[in-house]
Image: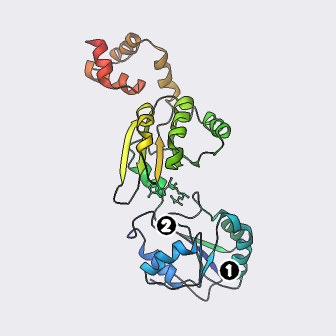
Amino acid sequence: MKEINQKEAGTLYIVATPIGNLEDITLRAINVLKNVDLIAAEDTRHTLKLLNHLEISKPLISYHRHNEDVKTDILIKELKQGKQIALVSDAGTPGICDPGEEVIKKCIEEEIKIVPIPGACAMINALICSGLDTKEFLFMGFLPLNKKNRKEKLKEIKNETKTIILYEAPHKLEATLKDLKEILENRKIVLARELTKIHEEYIRENLDVLIEKAKDIKGEMVLIIEGAKKKEDNHLMDLSLEEHYAYYEKQGLSKKDIIKQIAKDRNVNKNEIYQKFI
Ligand code: SAM
């Protein structure tokens, strides 16, 4: 595989790196890292560990949130001189809650070629194993730190019917879950933690149960939250339990299926509904 053509003008390769398991680097990523002139890294010390593991030795330049402006200009200059550059972040896909956006926008402006080298991304892997709806989703990255702004942001998505994906840090988990419960109300949530690592785990609960467990949950995590019920399903919540039952009975569902469906609509355990109807 000959990825790099040295005769071409400079290209910026956006290279995804592992999010925990060093085996999650693609052959193409290795090839690009081996052949570029320069690697722009979020944290050069961190990237050096990966490069040492891959037995690659390359000049590194730091490119992180706090020097994006200055380093963008330097990288653009090098690219214009025909340099082949790889951009990597500490983990996963650059530009996804990681630096990258600035230099990518500037490359487009300057008509410099950019090439993605796909690989690990925490939110995609959390979503696909969540068991929640993957057809449509909304990725929101980290919620604002400020409590007021965080709540405002959540109010904006109160009626969002798509699956919602958030990144969160363990020390803020409990507060975030409480805000989610207050504004989005109780609904299904999946916490995917330590993806691709030894302690990888998926905790599939309702928000109220997860809040109880939050204090003991550590590690890197992604939250995948069920979207709001669609309008046509929403009216069911205004019905009494008996009316809700009658609604499905009219549709010819069996008693077992009615109970299952009501539990699903109301986000409660089906035994709870079953007890009401025996
Ligand atoms: N660029 C990265 C990506 O492609 O996913 C995301 C970088 S962001 C600064 C770091 C956040 O991603 C963590 O706080 C966590 O929410 C999530 N994350 C990264 N690695 C993870 C992992 N192995 N398991 C679960 N979440 C992870």
Give the residue drawn at x 64%, y 39%: 147
Q: Secondary structure at mark 1?
A: helix
Q: Amino acid at mark 1?
A: Leu
Is residue 126 at all visible to an observer of this figure? yes
Q: Quadrant of the N terminus?
A: bottom left
Q: Crowdedness of circle 1 by 10 Å Cα count: few (<14), some, many (20+)?
A: some
Q: Up-down: is 217 above or below 206?
A: below
Q: Nearer the viewer, residue 90 or 268?
A: 90
Disc tally is 2
Residue receiving disc 1: 79
Give the residue drawn at x 39%, y 66%: 21
**Can you give x and y, in whole percent of width and height, for residue 218 in the image?**
43, 50
Q: Amino acid at mark 2?
A: Pro
Q: Secondary structure at mark 2?
A: loop
Is residue 252 at all visible to an observer of this figure? no
Q: Name the N-terminal-most of marks 2 and 1.
A: 1
The outermost residue toward the bottom is 7
**Can you give x and y, in whole percent of width and height, for residue 20 in the image?**
42, 63
Q: Up-down: is 180 above or below 141?
A: above
Residue receiving disc 2: 118
